[in-house]
Image: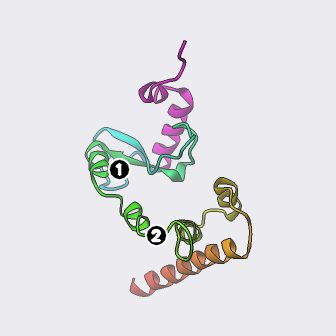
Amino acid sequence: MNTKKTYSEKLKDPRWQKLRLEVMNANGFCCEICGDAESTLHVHHKEYLKGHEVWEYEVRQLSVVCESCHAAEHESTDILKMVCSYAPMDGPCNRSEIAFVIAGHLNIPFEKLIKESGMSDCTWTRAQYEAGMYLSRLSDHMFSVIK
């Protein structure tokens, strides 16, 4: 007997329902894109990770969107994936290097990144991560100057 659940069955799982409410509450029960609080809201996975169940994500990896913004999100080109498609698989500026820079910029804990990626904690990974942290501070400074 096949016990594998369909995606819609997984969305009925209490673990997903609990996480869904936590995400909705954290975002004030309104669309993060347009601010709509009257339409039907969805919790959107910003990215699906291989081997993860729908409820095995952090709140930061999910977003609250109204039906129309959710449809538009799925119809639009993911610019990050498009940019990463230009990155070589190995060598300078490869996808892993870009990922560590972005993770530092987003302040994703370095230890979590190492654990999830299966990569080693070495001078190279730390340098890329710290470059991202520097870009984040620079970006914050530039934003405060512009305001």
Task: Say which of 63 and 127 sits in front.
Answer: 127
- Crowding at dot 1, Cα within 10 Å, few <14 / some 14-19 / many 20+, comes out as many
Q: Main secondary structure of the magenta part?
A: helix
Image position of 6 with respect to 93: above or below: above
In this picture, residue 123 sits left or right of residue 51: right
Residue 28 drawn above or below residue 10: below
Locate residue 18: give its quadrant.
top right
Read off the residue under disc 1.
Answer: 31
- Magenta residues span 1-26
x, y percentage for residue 30?
Answer: 37, 48
Residue under numbered circle 2: 87
Who is closer to the viewer here, 72 or 4?
4
- Disc 1 marks a residue whose amino acid type is Cys
For mark 1, give the secondary structure.
loop
Q: Find residue 86 and report its horizontal and vertical position in percent.
A: 41, 69
Label 2 secondary element: loop
Q: Is residue 9 above or below residue 112?
A: above
| Residue displayed at 44% across by 87% down | 145
145 horizontally vs 22: left or right:
left
Q: Amino acid at mark 2?
A: Ala
Q: Residues within 10 Å of mark 2 (few under 14, many from 20)?
A: some
Q: Is residue 136 above or below residue 79?
A: below
- Quadrant of the snapshot with the C terminus: bottom left
Q: Which mark, residue 55?
A: none
User: Percent from the top left, x then y, of residue 94?
Assistant: 53, 70
Quadrant in which residue 8 is drawn: top left
